[in-house]
């Protein structure tokens, strides 16, 4: 008989029978962080152990670094995060993270931003309408997926997917951001997780 390996056990109850409010929308803004701007030693991944599950990350950027905010009209629904679970050829769970953003117009600034997005690797913070901040691409980063920029049929812009590379998917679903200062998640997001320079 084969050995039985148990990596995780589901315990307790999950009662959704009386749930009234479901979060169904992302605020139409994200913070895109250069992958190498994150201070991995100062950041803390809080997975918990045994029956305790946390699934948060206390992310800290390197000194003098901050993310880039992309904002869209709040009555839209372009910005959203998704993840798709699959199993690798080796039998391990993997998750393809995707965050959709929008780029619009044909200015030099937009073309430069797209060129940088296409050449870089990023971690993306997206905020749900209840204030929860999700972190996508923590382990391996996200880059632009395939897209066609069509100003005419796209109404002046195009949805750009930022996603895991097929061969570099994440081993975890998106994490919840946990501020070093309790209750400051929204403020940290709005300040683009800026890490000031120490005088």
Image (spheres, grey):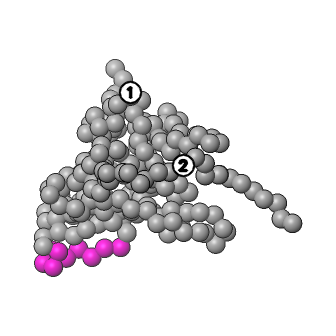
Q: Which residues are magenta?
A: 146-154
Q: Is residue 154 left or right of residue 184?
A: left
- At 41% from the left and 41% from the top, the residue drawn is 177
Asked if labels 1 and 2 touch by Cβ distance under 8 angstroms, the answer is: no
- At 71% from the left and 54% from the top, the residue drawn is 6
Residue 30: in sight, yes or no? no
Residue marked by disc 1: 181
Foreground: 41 or 130?
130
The quadrant in which the C terminus is found is top left
**Tag 1 or tag 2, which sits nearer the N-term?**
2
Horizontal and vertical percent position of residue 122: 39, 53
Residue marked by disc 2: 13
Q: Is residue 42 left or right of residue 148?
A: right
Foreground: 160 or 19?
19
SS for callout 1: loop
Mark 2, residues whose alpha carbon is within 10 Å: few (<14), some, or many (≥20)?
few
Foreground: 155 or 85?
85
Q: Vertically, is 192 above or below 142?
A: above
Mark 1, residues whose alpha carbon is within 10 Å: few (<14), some, or many (≥20)?
few
Horizontal and vertical percent position of residue 136: 41, 53
Q: Is residue 82 magenta?
A: no
Q: Which mark is residue 140?
A: none
Rendering quarter of residue 94:
bottom right
């Amino acid at each position: 008989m084969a050995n039985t390996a148990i990596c995780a056990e589901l315990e307790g109850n999950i009662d959704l029978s009386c749930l009234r409010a479901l979060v169904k929308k992302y605020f139409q803004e994200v913070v895109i962080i250069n992958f190498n701007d994150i201070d991995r030693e100062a950041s803390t991944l809080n997975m918990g152990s045994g029956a305790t599950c946390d699934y948060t990350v206390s992310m800290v950027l390197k000194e003098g670094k901050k993310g880039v905010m992309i904002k869209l009209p709040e009555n839209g629904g372009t910005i959203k995060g998704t993840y798709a679970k699959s199993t690798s050829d080796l039998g391990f769970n993997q998750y393809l993270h995707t965050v959709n953003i929008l780029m619009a117009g044909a200015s030099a600034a937009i073309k430069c931003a797209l060129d940088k997005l296409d050449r870089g690797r990023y971690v993306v913070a997206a905020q749900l309408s209840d204030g929860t901040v999700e972190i996508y691409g923590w382990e391996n980063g996200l880059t632009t997926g395939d897209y066609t920029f069509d100003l005419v049929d796209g109404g002046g812009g195009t949805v750009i997917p930022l996603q895991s590379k097929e061969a570099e998917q994440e081993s975890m679903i998106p994490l919840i951001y946990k501020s070093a200062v309790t209750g400051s998640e929204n403020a940290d997001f709005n300040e683009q997780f800026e890490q000031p320079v120490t005088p």
